[in-house]
Image (tube, rainbow, N blue to C red):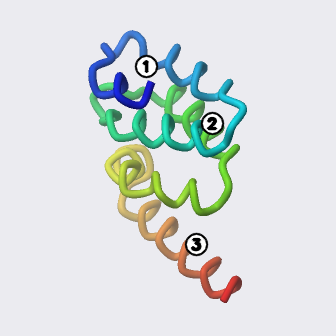
Amino acid sequence: MTGLAPHLPESLLPEALEVARGIGNEYYRADVLKALTATLTPANVDLSFWENTLQALGTLTRPHFLETIPNLAPLILHFGGEVALREVYQGIRDVSRWWR
């Protein structure tokens, strides 16, 4: 599914997200979710889909989740503005310091 993600029509993104959420192996689930998030733009994601995407990403371990952050930056800016992007950045820095 990772190879298909860039070629999926917008109408299939919600279904693809549900399929990805159902993948039991976290490594493969993370790989597919990362590929899906790379296809998301403010033009093809509404608030409901954004919330579902965040819930799906919440099933990942920290390292796998952090790999998706670069793909999410445009959406974070779109839905939360610069303040949200700064808060995400600060949150990542804070947690990184806690786990040194």
**Left or right of residue 95: residue 36:** left
**Left or right of residue 92: residue 8:** left
Q: Given this view, does label 3 or label 2 mark the residue nearer the observer?
A: 2
* N-terminal-most mark, 2 or 1: 1
* N-terminal-most mark, 3 or 2: 2
**Left or right of residue 97: residue 50:** left
**Residue nearest the viewer, comparing 68 with 44:** 68
Q: Is residue 58 above or below residue 36?
A: below
Residue at label 1?
13
Q: Position of residue 49 (x, y in %)?
A: 51, 26
Q: Amino acid at mark 1?
A: Leu
Residue at label 3?
91
- For the C terminus, the image quarter is bottom right
Q: Is residue 10 above or below residue 53?
A: above
Quick one: SS at disc 2?
helix
Residue at label 2?
56
Q: Amino acid at mark 3?
A: Gly
Q: Position of residue 8 (x, y in %)?
A: 33, 17
Q: CA distance from mark 3 to mark 2?
A: 19 Å
Q: Position of residue 79 (x, y in %)?
A: 42, 44
Residue 43 falls in which quadrant of the image? Answer: top left
Quick one: SS at disc 3?
helix
**Left or right of residue 66: residue 74:** left
Residue drawn at (31%, 13%) of the image: 9
- For the N terminus, the image quarter is top left
Quick one: SS at disc 1?
helix
Q: Position of residue 42 (x, y in %)?
A: 31, 35
Residue drawn at (44%, 51%) of the image: 80
Q: Tell me if mark 3 has few (under 14), some (14-19) or many (20+) residues whose alpha carbon lies within 10 angstroms of its own.
A: few
**Residue nearest the viewer, comparing 28 with 18:** 28
Q: CA distance from mark 2 to mark 1?
A: 13 Å
